Amino acid sequence: MATAHRRIFSGVQPTGNLHLGNYLGAIRNWVRLQDQYDDCLFCVVDLHAITVWQDPASLRASTREVAAAMIAAGIDAEKHVVFNQSQVPAHAELAWVFNCVARMGWLNRMTQFKEKAGKNKENASVGLFAYPNLMAADILAYHGTHVPVGDDQKQHLELARDIAIKFNNDFGTDFFPVVEPLILGEATRVMSLRDGTKKMSKSDPSDYSRITLTDDADAILQKVRKAKTDPEPLPAAKEGFAGRPEAQNLMTLYAALADEGMDQVLARFGGGQFSRFKQDLADLMVAKLQPMTGEMRRLAADPGYIDGVLKRGAERARAISEPIMAQVQDIVGFLRP
């Protein structure tokens, strides 16, 4: 039976060089959510990562790096469940069931697949196409009820809702909850420092397009100073962002890092020059990120500790997912011992 209990599930891919977008769009929100919800699962989604080819050694290293970033940012791995996806069989098993519930037409409408596959659609992996079904399984294998998502994941979450409803209808049950999105705060979508119309990404060839979580203070200052701007003074009102994506991105970053509304940032810096604002933004970034960077480095030097955290988290995740999967098997009609 669907439950009224509120359970948060969220995941992040183990991509090396975690950047400011990963922190503001996901990890920082998780740190806040853990104080509002007693039941949170935070997952390094390594099954999602292999929808495109990964070097195995790099994948293992990146998985540890993301786990270290979560802990360094303040996620309590004793109170909440921190684990990597591949250690819990329920993700892949339920994803297959959902492959048989979801319709091709639904997946064909997913804009992110079109963006990632580009012109090479025929050469994309089946996993990349069916990725949203695995995302639905990630959440529903735990009867997750609320998922913090960025704007770019909203369509996938709507698909997870559709899959839950269709499964329940197909089998005459109300077993799976219909998931609710949590869209939080400023800067859920962090843009490149070199092009305010593109998302900050580790795949951008320019290091100056992103602030990574391992950058030291000098690197942060240099990247912010070189961030693209325009010749006009900073806008004093939101309407002034029209046609000025770089100004909007930098001021949004300040608002997010300072935990202020955009109106406050516009009132303080509007009409001023980019040079002064950039110094203040760089100082703020250093103050917010350097303690976490130092802790990440300390944790990275002890991979055995990280592996232990993920192992214990996976054991707890399996304890939640296994009874749910046993019920799924019964509902679907699988013969079990």
Image: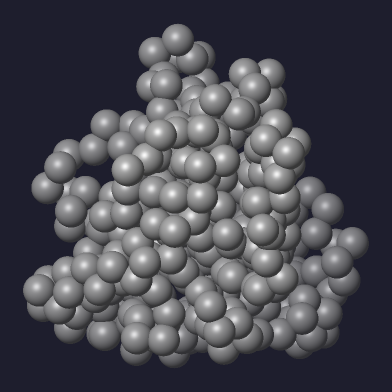
> How is the model colour-coded?
one colour
* Residue displayed at 72% across by 71% down: 4
Quadrant where the N terminus sits is bottom right
The residue lying furthest to the front in this view is 337
**Residue 234 appears at what percent x and percent y?**
74, 70
Instruction: Examine the rendering and report whether any part of residue 184 can be seen.
Output: no
* On screen, residue 208 above or below 64: above
Quadrant where the C terminus sits is top left
**Residue 208 appears at what percent x and percent y?**
40, 56
Q: As rendered, which of 7 and 131 lies closer to the eye?
A: 7
* On screen, residue 170 above or below 174: above
* On screen, residue 120 above or below 243: above
* Residue displayed at 79% across by 49% down: 243
Q: Is residue 95 left or right of residue 248?
A: left
* Residue displayed at 51% across by 50% down: 327
Q: Is residue 6 left or right of residue 13?
A: right
Tally the numbered discs.
0
**Residue 293 appears at what percent x and percent y?**
30, 80
Instruction: Examine the rendering and report whether any part of residue 168 can be seen.
Output: yes
Question: In which image quadrant can residue 2 be found?
Answer: bottom right
The residue lying furthest to the top in this view is 122
Q: As rendered, which of 62 and 252 lies closer to the eye?
A: 62
**Residue 102 appears at what percent x and percent y?**
62, 28
